[in-house]
C-alpha cells in the first residue's frame, strides 16, 4: 500500500487499526475464539500488528509536501479563466454555457467561503441566510454548511460560515437570480443543478477544475482543496483573527488551521518588521534626577 499504491499514511493507519482491533478480539480469552480455532484448525489466532510493522503517527501534518495554496495571482487567473469560458460559450451559441456559468460561480464559492469539495456539492439554496452584523450582504450573509467533514462513525458536522468577500456574494446573487432558474428545475433544492435535473457531484467538480488548471498550465500540485487553503492563507495575510478562521473552516484545533496557513514572504517580512520595531526603536524615558540621583548627575556633568 505504501510503495505500490502510494496510499496516505492516515489511510494505512486506518486499515492497521481495523486489523489490530479484529485480532485483539480474536485472541481475547473472554470470547472463546482461541479454543474454537484450536478445535477446528489445530492452531490459534495471534496478533499481527506490532510496532515494527505498522506506521506510527509522529507528525501533525502528513499531507503531500508538494501541496500548496494558490497565490493571489494564480487564483485570480483561474477565476478569470472560468468566467472567460462562459463568454466563449455564449458567443459561440453552443451548449454548455449554463454549466460553465454554474461552475465559475461554484469555484468562487469554494474560495470565497473556504469550503471542501463535498461540502460545496451538497449545498442548497436555502443554506444561505442573513447576518444582522453584515446587512450589506442581504440574505447571503451566512452559509449553513450541513455536510461538513465527519469524524469516523459520526454524522456530518454542521457549521455556519460568515460571508466576508463581497465580490463572492455578488457572484452568488447573480447566479441564483439570473442563471439557476434557466436550468428549468426550480423545485430542486440544490444550489448547483445539472442540465438533467440532478445535483453536481464532487467528481464533476474535480474534472472541471483539472481541465481549467491544465489549460492554464498551472502546477498539478494545485487541487480543488488548494482553494480552501488559499482562503485561510490570504485572510491570514490580511490580518483576520486566527480563531475566527478556525471557526470558519470548521477545525476543532488551531493546529489544523496552522497546517492550512502558507503565508507569503511579503507577509512574513511585514510581521518581522512589526516584531523588530520595539527592539529597533526602544522607548526613551526621561531621566529623573532627584535627591542623590541629582547629585550623581551633577558630578558626572562636572
Image (cartoon, rainbow, N blue to C red):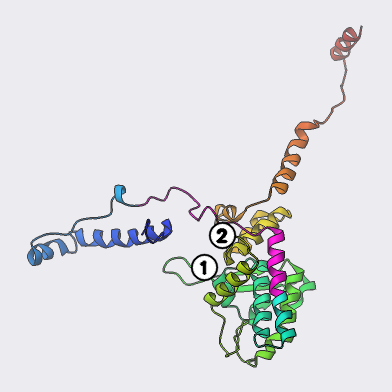
Where residue 246 appears, as percent x and y from the top left, is 61, 58
**Is residue 85 visible from the viewing direction of this image?**
yes
| Viewer-nearest residue: 62 or 4 | 4
Camera-nearest residue between 260 and 74 = 74
Residue 167 found in image quarter: bottom right
Q: Is 276 located above or below residue 100 in the figure?
A: above
Check if residue 24 falls in the magenta segment: no
Residue 12, position in %: x, y?
38, 59
**Left or right relative to 95: residue 298:** right
Give me the residue at 72% from left, 43% from top: 269
Q: Which mark is residue 120?
A: none
- Helix or strand or loop: what does disc 1 sit on? loop
Q: Is residue 78 left or right of residue 280?
A: left
Rendered view: 140 above or below 4: below
* Foreground of the two, 189 or 195: 195
- Name which residue lies at 55% across and 74% down: 207
Please give the name of the residue rendered at 24% of the width and 62% of the height, measured from the top-left corner. Answer: 25
Residue linked to disc 1: 149
Q: Quadrant of residue 121?
A: bottom right
Q: Quadrant of the N terminus?
A: bottom left
Magenta-drawn segment: 55-83
- Residue 133 appears in the picture as rendered: no
Circle 1 residues within 10 Å: few <14, some 14–19, many ≥20: some
> Which of the image's four quarters has the C terminus?
top right
Residue labelled with disc 2: 221
Locate residue 33 relative to residue 160 in the image: left or right. left
Q: CA distance from mark 1 to mark 2?
A: 22 Å
Q: Residue at x 75, y 32 (%)?
A: 279
x%, y% of residue 127? Answer: 63, 78
Amino acid at each position: 500500500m505504501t510503495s505500490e499504491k502510494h496510499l496516505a499514511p492516515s489511510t494505512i493507519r486506518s486499515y492497521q487499526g481495523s486489523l489490530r482491533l479484529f485480532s485483539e478480539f480474536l485472541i481475547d480469552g473472554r470470547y472463546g475464539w482461541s479454543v474454537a480455532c484450536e478445535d477446528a484448525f489445530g492452531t490459534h489466532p495471534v496478533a499481527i500488528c506490532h510496532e515494527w510493522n505498522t506506521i506510527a503517527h509522529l507528525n501533525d501534518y502528513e499531507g503531500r509536501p508538494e501541496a500548496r495554496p494558490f497565490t493571489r495571482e494564480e487564483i485570480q487567473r483561474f477565476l478569470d479563466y472560468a468566467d472567460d469560458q462562459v463568454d466563449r460559450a455564449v458567443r459561440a451559441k453552443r451548449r454548455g454555457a449554463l454549466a460553465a456559468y454554474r461552475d465559475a460561480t461554484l469555484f468562487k464559492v469554494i474560495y470565497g467561503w473556504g469550503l471542501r469539495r463535498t461540502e460545496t456539492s451538497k449545498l442548497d439554496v436555502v443554506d444561505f441566510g442573513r447576518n444582522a452584523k453584515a446587512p450589506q450582504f442581504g440574505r447571503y450573509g451566512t452559509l449553513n454548511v450541513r455536510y461538513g467533514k465527519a469524524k469516523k462513525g459520526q454524522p456530518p458536522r454542521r457549521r455556519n460560515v460568515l460571508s466576508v468577500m463581497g465580490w463572492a456574494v455578488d457572484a452568488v446573487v447573480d447566479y441564483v437570480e439570473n442563471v439557476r432558474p434557466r436550468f428549468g428545475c426550480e423545485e430542486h433544492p440544490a444550489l448547483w443543478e445539472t442540465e438533467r435535473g440532478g445535483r453536481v457531484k464532487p467528481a464533476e467538480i474535480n474534472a472541471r477544475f483539472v481541465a481549467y488548471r491544465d489549460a492554464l498550465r498551472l502546477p498539478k500540485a494545485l487541487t480543488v482543496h488548494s482553494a480552501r487553503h488559499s482562503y485561510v492563507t490570504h485572510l491570514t495575510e490580511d490580518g483576520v483573527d486566527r480563531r475566527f478562521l478556525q471557526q470558519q473552516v470548521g477545525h476543532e484545533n488551531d493546529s489544523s488551521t496552522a497546517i492550512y496557513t502558507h503565508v507569503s514572504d511579503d507577509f512574513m517580512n511585514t510581521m518581522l518588521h512589526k516584531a523588530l520595531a520595539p527592539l529597533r526603536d526602544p522607548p526613551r524615558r526621561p531621566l529623573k534626577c532627584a535627591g542623590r540621583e541629582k547629585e550623581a548627575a551633577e558630578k558626572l556633568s562636572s
